[in-house]
Amino acid sequence: MNMEAIKPVGVRSEQVAPVLIHIEKLNKWYGDFQVLKDVSLEVRKGERVVICGPSGSGKSSLIRCINRLEEHQEGSIVVDGVELSSKLKRIDKIRSEVGMVFQHFNLFPHLTILENCTLAPRWVRKISRKDANELAMHFLERVRIPQKAHDYPNQLSGGQQQRVAIARALCMNPRVMLFDEPTSALDPEMIKEVLDTMISLAEEGMTMVCVTHEMGFARKVADKVVFMDGGQILESGTPDNLFGAPRHARTQGFLSQLLS
Ligand code: ADP
Ligand code: MG
């Protein structure tokens, strides 16, 4: 992997990019249990944010709120100018603007790779079967797996399935991509092919929020690394700052465990 960092968002253009995701004082509970506490986060267009932190710290809950797979109770989330609230009528519109890639791929097992990729474009975007097929083949080529278009998910390796999941999300032409530990269910030899796909997305300027503990990826791609613990953002900074000089003992402890 070429470890030279991709230029951060502020360096790529003279102007400051507009805010695409604005999260302010977000609080969320599951029953009595408060999973997110006063979380505030801003993601600008083209920015790549990596979220790390121990298991149970609320990372998945936070990113699932961004496409409303989960609801929050207090605070606000605005995605591309649309506030996510109970009044939101077009949840499918938000979902189509915010692509999501999960740890366990979540492909439909009874549909072919091509059908997995064309389902949402056809039924949400209402495009024709022919156009949807063309679109899907374009993105399957983009993730270098067009030859599997007519296979079923269980005929593919984990790394291949995850690349299909990325292609499927891209078929909706999302403004931002969310990744929730996309490589943590993969065998070690398959991690690189998925990270390389994500790196090339970053190089093309995709706005990305990635929950991952792949520090090499974070160092190469992230403009900002956010450390979460106990439902809070404890600290955030550039990869050099956060990994090189963490301010909190909890961050130091977590990072030293990752490295050991
Ligand atoms: P992470 O992704 O950082 O591991 P999660 O957001 O998945 O953290 O979970 C944070 C905490 O919330 C955990 O203690 C988990 O058990 C709890 N939790 C997650 N989802 C639910 C749910 N649907 N109902 C109740 N508790 C949940
Ligand atoms: Mg999680």
Image (spheres, grey):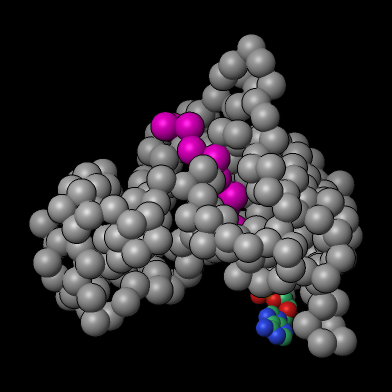
Bounds of the magenta span?
203-211
Residue 225 position in % (x across, y down):
68, 45
Of 88 and 226, the residue lying toward us: 88
Q: Quadrant of residue 66?
A: bottom right
Residue at image location 48% in from the left, 67% down from the top? 102
Q: Is residue 144 left or right of residue 236?
A: left
Q: Is residue 204 left or right of residue 180?
A: left
Q: Is residue 207 magenta?
A: yes
Residue at image location 73% in from the left, 52% down from the top? 83
Of 225 and 135, the residue lying toward us: 135
Residue 20 position in % (x across, y down):
65, 40
Identify the residue at the far top of this view. 14
Q: Say if residue 170 shows up in the picture.
A: yes
Of 220 and 23, the residue lying toward us: 23
- Which quadrant holds the C terminus? bottom right
Residue at image location 39% in from the left, 70% down from the top? 105
* Image height of 227 relative to 231, above or below: above
Residue at image location 33% in from the left, 57% down from the top? 126
Of 176 and 238, the residue lying toward us: 176
* Image height of 92 relative to 81, above or below: below
Residue 174 position in % (x across, y down):
47, 47
Q: Quadrant of residue 17?
A: top right
Q: Quadrant of residue 10?
A: top right
Residue 103 position in % (x across, y down):
47, 69
* Image height of 243 relative to 51, above or below: above
* Image height of 81 relative to 163, above or below: above
